[in-house]
Amino acid sequence: MKELSYFCQRMIRFALLLTTVSATKMNVPRLRLSYKDLVATNRSSIFSGHHGQLSLSALFLDEYHDRLFLGGKDVLYSLRLDHTNLDSKEIYWPPLPGNRDECVQRGKDSQTECANFVRLLQPYNRTHLLACGTGAFQPMCTYVYVGYRGEHVFTMDPTKMENGRGKVPHDPSLTFASTLIGGELYTGLTADFLGRDSVIFRSLGGRSTMRTETDQRLLHDPKFVAAHLIPDNDDRDNDKVYFFFTEKAMEAGNREGAIHTRVGRVCANDAGGQRVLVNKWSTFIKARLVCSVPGPHGIDTHFDELEDVFLLRGKDEKNPDVYAIFSTISNVFQGFAVCVYRMADIREAFNGPFAHKEGPDYQWGAYEGRVPYPRPGVCPSKITNQPGRQFGSTKDFPDAVLQFARGHPLMWRPVYPAMKQPLLVKANLPYRLKQIVVDRVEAEDGQYDVMFIGTDIGTVLKVIALRSGNTLDTEEVTLEELQVFKVPTPITSLEISVKRQALYVGSPVGMAQLRLHRCETYGKACAECCLARDPYCAWDGTSCTRYTSLSRRRYRRQDIRHGNPALQCMDQNLSGERGGDGGFKRRVVLGIIVHPLSTMVTCKETRAVIITLHKKGFTGKDIAASKISPKSTIYRNIKNFKESGSIVVKKASGRPRKSHKGQDHLLKLIQLRDRGTTSTELAQEWQQTGVSASARTVRRRLLEDGLVSAKKPLLSRKNIRDRQIFCKGYRDWTAEDWGKVIFSDDTPFRLFGACGKKLVRRRQGDRYHQSCVMPTVKHPETIHVWGCFSAKGVGSLTILPKNTAMN
């Protein structure tokens, strides 16, 4: 079994790598900016607190008050949304007297644990925030006065504190999830000092406190990630609170350590039972969230560890898209995936069969018996009420319903992502994906969901995933990779303001404010703007700017789906080969329309076309066949793109010149002394004067002065014509015929004067200059040498006597 397990792990890893290779081939960020680049160009604003170390642990974006509220170690901050470094307000909030010392006595660390780490910031009403902190392992809460809209006040009464147990964890390192609804706080957390009592709590408000039973069938060592209110319909009595978490999987059988990601829910109006489940959740049910890729032999690769969840809400508040980041739990390799879930699929799973197990020796399966009414997990509302069977509260539910809910909290059918596969898959990365927010952007050819993903090394990835029609294949396009913070640090929170087109990035060292787009950075050419494939950006005729649907369509250039700059940027002012209809011919090269000799084509745009073809998987040889640029230029651009990840060529100082003007003049004098001196000989003579240069450099220097090499062609036109006649006359000969032929030739060697043709360097008009012609000798003394070869081999050389006639 161990061998099989190892084999399965290897096959799973292989399947994931195959999946990611096709998804990430040539997926280089279109724009990569370092921390220095962002700060130097004022594209990032960092807030590190008034004392240089923020230790950020909570962040709340308040669009109503136009403020950003931060919670850190013993401190609260209120910042302006438009300028986070201006008009910041601070509240010092340490643990209660004596709590810090007591925490240290219990063996906790005085710096990283025995302080008041603010973990929760939620809007309590229009004028107050609910703030809760760990309080040196004695959680406490208070209400912060923030005033009405436009007042920008930020005060707290230190004497009015409440017990925070059940609202935030004792330990600042433990995860939890919470949401405040109608003055009531719903929280999933570990509520005790030791971090063992995992519960879902409802506190505050006028109703009694609610919690889950201590039962591993309900929650088994969960790690809570997110909590959200999502209404089912227009009846507010049907509102449900959804919790997203991972836990140990009871149904996994003997697979030790197996964990599954869950989506659980409770009714917001749950009041518990009358005799059973008193002050306990009576509507809690959960289902598995599956995020996996298929592998060979039916073995899927599962991403079971939930990292973060973001709800992309649209006009229909009842059906947001659920974006989730998952990671693998395998020790063999590290992989990450982004899956998207539809609320219709989640509700379908909750309306399906319950998971059931008859006993310890039985397998899990779908419950096929009678399910009591009202169905466990539904809320008391107009839908559940029937004539003669009125349920005004969960306290009115029959005991059979509550007993069934207690014993069957898990649904049998899992929830699969849209299209039954991840939207994004990454493997073997040098970092971990930790946070995600999404913005739905209107572009020229439709809507695109732009993902902003935070990592554990302080970078933010801006990514879109493109699908062609109804196919399952996706193309991942990484638009940007931004190093937000100066030192590598995990990103712990992301908030997006679509209204202000801003992204707020939180980490232990501080909070950064970024714009959602940097269109002007993509370049100053139409092709560069189109190749960016950024839904936020479009070419407006003169520059790459923010795309708006109200801009003039005539000059707008944008192609997100195909990234084809040739089609977008080369359709005006064409000049090229005339077609038969009086127009201009356009060549379709490798799927891209190329306009020959277009007056709009610049070096940047040619480079952009080369890179977009390279991204589509074409080799340098394929691109060279299109003849859009010399082969050497194509390979050089591809090499530069692989090294830098950008088609933008940075301005360089260039290599220093090998020689100065005086040395160049000396080289010219050496050449003029003997026009027939070769480049190699010149380089050797030049080196003796202190200039170390190649023969190629010598030729370039002489060319600058107009000295070009000149010699007669090896074959004259008559020679070429005679050879063609010879070849045509014997083209029907067989190998046997040619085997009977002896090929021979002779050549003279002069004992005085030059033998044969000689290369000279001359300027225009120097053809008959004395230094450019060779002296001749009448009847020079020569030695004739004769040689031959045939199909049987090569004959020996023969020196011919003088005055031998060669016929």
Image: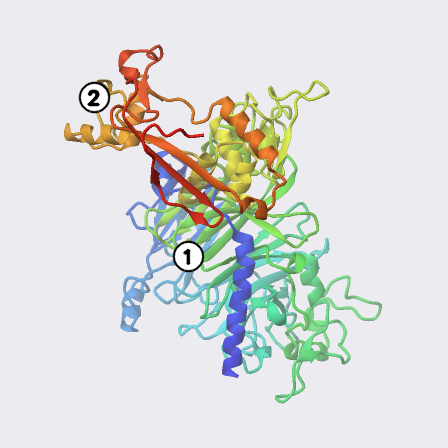
- Mark 2 neighbour class, 10 Å CA radius: few under 14, some 14 to 19, many 20 or more: some
Count of labels in the image: 2
In the foreground, 492 or 789 = 789
Distance between mark 1 and mark 2 Cα atoms: 61 Å
Can you tell which mark lies on residue 431? 1
Sequence-earlier tag: 1 or 2: 1
- Mark 1 neighbour class, 10 Å CA radius: few under 14, some 14 to 19, many 20 or more: some
Q: Position of residue 738 (x, y in %)?
A: 55, 44
Residue at horizontal 50 percent and vertical 71 percent from the top? 10
Q: Position of residue 531 (x, y in %)?
A: 54, 36
Amino acid type, label 2: Ile
Please give left or right for residue 788 compared with residue 113 in the image.
Answer: right
Residue at horizontal 56 percent and vertical 32 percent from the top? 726
Element carrying mark 2: helix
In the foreground, 645 or 610 = 610
Compared with 657, 413 (above or below) is: below
Find residue 194 and report its image quarter: bottom left
Compared with 367, 228 (above or below) is: above
Query: Residue 394, can we see it?
Result: yes
Find residue 710 and report its image quarter: top left
Residue at horizontal 34 percent and vertical 64 percent from the top? 136
In the foreground, 783 or 424 = 783
Can you tell which mark lies on residue 670? 2
Element carrying mark 1: loop
Amino acid type, label 1: Tyr
